[in-house]
Image: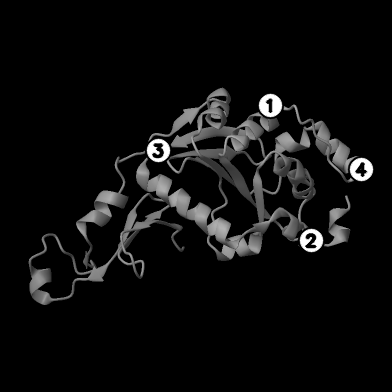
């Protein structure tokens, strides 16, 4: 069975080698580098077995990208702590959304109105809109990329319509077809990045309910999520452009 490898990082400025990958199932670290093949070099290695391979990598690769603890202990926070991050970030807040739907949306009266009329209303005095408008009015950036199925689910069509309300308070909402996200190797993860220094990883159950929120501050991990953000932004298109790609028959619920 093939390993499930996640790119961890590289110090290379040119071709991406040497690099580290992590086996998601076992936690093992896969080191990619220049093979050591000279018999005199190999003869100096201790405990070197007949099936082993040796590679040479810069020390900085392991210092910068190697795990800092044998077993990572997640830092979980409650929802109130998470919400305060939107009031305290300094310059940018950005999210990747990858799910086919969210239980919280299906419980929203605005979603029921969308099912009935095809258009989602909103209350501009909702706390979210008030906070985000205050932040964007202050010159801060708030945005997200949403991954959508083809054809979009009903929940995704609801959010596509609702995004005009987000845009009205200054959010930059962009979209990416799932097949394009897969080709770009984006993970099926939902997360927020605050000021390119803190990641809030959102975990959901099979019924799309939010299970927990993990804060990540380890520099190598934060950089990895920032790379994912840059990849998503490169491939995504603005909400209005994406809406034009969705066939009118798919927009009717």
Residue 71 horizontal/vertical position (percent): 34, 39
**Mark identifier at residue 203:** none
Secondary structure of the residue carrying numbered label 3: loop
Q: Earlier in the sequence, mark 2 or mark 4?
A: 4
The residue that mark 4 highlights is 117
- Asked whether disc 1 touches disc 3, contact meaning CB atoms under 8 Å apart, the reply is no
Q: Earlier in the sequence, mark 1 or mark 3?
A: 1
Q: Earlier in the sequence, mark 4 or mark 3?
A: 4
- Asked whether disc 1 touches disc 2, contact meaning CB atoms under 8 Å apart, the reply is no
Q: Nearer the viewer, mark 2 or mark 4?
A: 2
Q: Nearer the viewer, residue 53 or 241?
A: 241
Q: Earlier in the sequence, mark 4 or mark 1?
A: 4
Q: Earlier in the sequence, mark 1 or mark 2?
A: 1
Q: Earlier in the sequence, mark 2 or mark 3?
A: 3
The residue most toward the front is: 138
The residue most toward the bottom is: 38
- Asked whether disc 4 touches disc 3, contact meaning CB atoms under 8 Å apart, the reply is no
Q: CA distance from mark 2 to mark 4?
A: 19 Å
**Mark identifier at residue 127:** 1
Secondary structure of the residue carrying numbered label 2: helix
The residue that mark 2 highlights is 244
Against 194, residue 150 (above or below) is: below
Q: Nearer the viewer, residue 7 or 26?
A: 7
């Amino acid at each position: 069975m093939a390993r499930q490898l996640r790119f961890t990082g590289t110090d290379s400025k040119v071709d991406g080698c040497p690099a580290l990958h992590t086996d998601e199932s076992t936690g093992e670290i896969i080191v990619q580098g220049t093979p050591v093949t000279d018999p005199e070099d190999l003869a100096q290695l201790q405990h070197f077995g007949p099936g082993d391979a040796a590679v040479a990598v810069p020390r900085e690769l392991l210092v910068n990208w190697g795990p800092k603890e044998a077993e990572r202990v997640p830092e979980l926070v409650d929802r109130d702590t998470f919400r305060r991050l939107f009031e305290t970030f300094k310059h940018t807040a950005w999210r990747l959304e990858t799910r086919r739907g969210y239980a919280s949306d299906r419980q929203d009266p605005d979603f029921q109105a969308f099912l009935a009329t095809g258009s989602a209303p909103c209350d501009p005095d909702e706390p979210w809109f008030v906070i985000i408008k205050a932040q964007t009015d202050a010159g801060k950036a708030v945005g997200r990329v949403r991954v959508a199925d083809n054809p979009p689910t009903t929940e995704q069509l609801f959010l596509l319509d609702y995004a005009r309300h987000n845009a009205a308070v200054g959010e930059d909402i962009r979209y990416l077809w799932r097949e394009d996200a897969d080709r770009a190797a984006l993970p099926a993860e939902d997360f927020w990045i605050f000021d390119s220094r803190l990641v809030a990883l959102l975990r959901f159950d099979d019924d799309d309910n939010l299970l927990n929120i993990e804060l990540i501050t380890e520099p190598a991990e934060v950089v990895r999520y920032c790379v994912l953000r840059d990849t998503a932004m490169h491939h995504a298109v603005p909400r209005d452009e994406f809406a034009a790609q969705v066939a009118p028959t798919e927009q009717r619920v």
